[in-house]
Amino acid sequence: MNTNVQNTAALVGRIMLALIFIISGFGKITGYAGTAGYMASKGLPMVALLLPLTILVELGGGLLIAFGWKARWAAALIFLFLIPVTLVFHNPAGLDAAAAQGQMIHLLKNISIMGGMLGLFAFGPGGYSFDAKSNP
């Protein structure tokens, strides 16, 4: 395959993968109180600490991936972050059928994103990235 095509696909793919985290992290900043209340309603302790860390992982990690700077480590961090998030917020067990179906969709979406993060971790961000520019 043509190197320019590969690098363009990697760039577009990184941005598409990062977009959900950038938007979600920004949304948590603009809706801070509501997000804190939702996290507390799920029984999470130390929301005052966990919410800023969540914003850092989502917004910071998403931007790192989009720009391709330290992208492998950001992908690994988001992969690990998604494990407890998926189990706590998208567990369909014990819900009525409609709610369970909705949560199953979110669970599978997160699993798919985790697969993308593992691919980014394994193969790197491609040639059109700050990582590639710093490693000639």
Image (cartoon, rainbow, N blue to C red):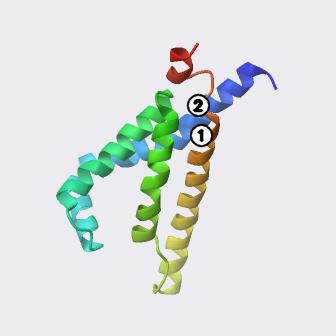
Label of residue 72 in the image: none
Q: Hey, what amino acid is under mark 1?
A: Leu
Direction top: furthest residue: 136
Of 130 and 121, nearer the camera is 121
What residue is drawn where x is 50% and y is 34%? 71
Query: How many callouts does the rendering have?
Result: 2
- SS class, disc 1: helix
What residue is drawn where x is 47% and y is 27%? 69
| Image location (x, y in percent) of residue 23 | 40, 44
What residue is drawn where x is 54% and y is 43%? 17
- Report whether 34 appears left or right of 84: left
What residue is drawn where x is 42% and y is 34%? 63
Of 122 and 41, nearer the camera is 122
Asked if disc 2 and disc 1 are in contact, CB closer than 8 Å, the reply is yes
Q: In which quarter of the image is the N terminus?
A: top right
Label of residue 125 in the image: 2
Q: Hey, what amino acid is under mark 2?
A: Pro
- Picture quadrant where residue 47 is located: bottom left
- Report whether 38 appears left or right of 80: left
| Image location (x, y in percent) of residue 127 | 62, 21
| Image location (x, y in percent) of residue 73 | 47, 38
- Picture quadrant where residue 108 is located: bottom right
Q: In which quarter of the image is the C terminus?
A: top right
Q: Mark 1 points at which residue?
A: 120
| Image location (x, y in percent) of residue 20 | 47, 47
Q: In this view, does 127 lie above or below 105?
A: above
Label 1: few (<14), some or many (≥20) within 10 Å? many
